[in-house]
Image (cartoon, rainbow, N blue to C red):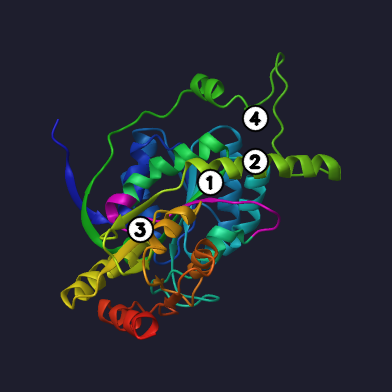
Amino acid sequence: MEKEVVLMKGNEAIAHAAIRCGCDGYFGYPITPQSEILETLAAEKPWETTGMVVLQAESELASINMIYGAGAAGKRAMTSSSSPGIALMQEGITYMAGAEIPGLIVNVQRGGPGLGTIQPSQSDYFQATRGGGNGDYNVIVLAPSSVQEMADFVETAFELAFKYRNPAMILSDGVIGQMMEKVILPPYKPRRTEAEIKAQCPWATIGRSQTRQPNILTSLDLDPVSMENRNLHLQAKYAEIKEKEVRYETQQCDDADYLIVAFGSAARIAQKAIELCREEGIKVGLLRPITLWPFPEKAIMEHGCRTRGILSFEINAGQMIEDIQIAINGKIPVAHFGHMGGVVPSPDEVVTALKEKLIKQ
């Protein structure tokens, strides 16, 4: 069957993909630059076709706790927001991680700190990969660089969230969320029946009956020994995720003398910068982390150590560079370039930064 190609924004692609991949419920609150996700879902009225619930909650705090409740019942539930809204959700996200409840959080980043600007940024890297909530926990983080990946990563994020019983995040930004590109939407996938949920999610708490006591899913444990054992279990799970679920993409790395590491919209800018460099005879390659957590440390070590230096290009003050430096362990120079507060760099600026920070050393 011929695939349908449509033109739409990244935010719209996420909404359509959610409907098509069997999402049970969306709970969110409007904030620029991600409001089209909620607006598209409201316009599509999936409750009339698939039975998917779409609700504008009273706040971001309410949204994440609705995801907590729906995920605890084994439902595919999601929310979306932008940077300061995601900050409000951090308590709920760490509760979900502690209770091992799956769910999808979409963050279409904007400039900060604080309320900041509505212009795009990548300054939530730490918030996503380090976790803004309390405790030792990790969120699976996928970073799309195209409208197609905005659609594709919805199903991927749900699959990973339920496979590992862990929150998953699509970390996008205002560029990818607002830009329009051709996209092939996924085929319709029916929502799971209650019987399928019971079979696939035996851990879910789906109510009490005369013959069944409900599962209790909580992150609270007042016994410190028991709590440490829970943490040891989580750390073992995170180690498995790091071993099995790293995703990345490379371009023109085989003969590269220098390597640019960039994710999301920055990776798209880096592609043009690499083209400009090679026109000048400077051999530069690109490594694009697709999973920001787990981070592709081994790949960066392998490709980076064959070069003379790495430029960490990110639209922030320098956050991902810390993970690159850990991976490289001082073996080659690592420099950072980026703008802050919502200013998007140009490819020419990336080329200039590469020359000044690495080539002229």
Q: Earlier in the sequence, mark 1 or mark 3?
A: 3
How busy is the neighbourhood of tag 1: few (under 14 within 10 Å), some, or many (20 plus)? some
Rounded to the nearest angstrom, the CA distance separating label 4 from label 3 is: 32 Å
Circles 2 and 3: CB atoms closer than 8 Å: no
**Front label number (4 vs 3):** 4
Look at mark 3 in the image and give the residue it sits on: 36
Residue 3: % across, % down = 17, 38
Rounded to the nearest angstrom, the CA distance separating label 1 from label 2 is: 10 Å
Q: Amino acid at mark 2?
A: Ala
Q: Residue furthest left?
A: 2
Q: Earlier in the sequence, mark 1 or mark 2?
A: 2
Q: Earlier in the sequence, mark 4 or mark 2?
A: 4
Residue 187 colored in magenta in the image: no
Q: Amino acid at mark 4?
A: Thr
SS for callout 2? helix
Residue 49: quadrant of the picture: top left
| Residue 59 visible at all | no
Look at mark 1 in the image and give the residue it sits on: 242
**Front label number (1 vs 4):** 1
Residue numbers of the magenta segment: 133-149
SS for callout 3? helix
Where, quadrant-wise, is the C terminus in this rendering? bottom left
Residue 164: % across, % down = 55, 37
Residue 118 located left or right of residue 241: left
Residue 189 located left or right of residue 1: right
Tell me the number on the disc at residue 205: 4
Could you tell me which residue is drawn at 59 percent across and 32 percent down? 73
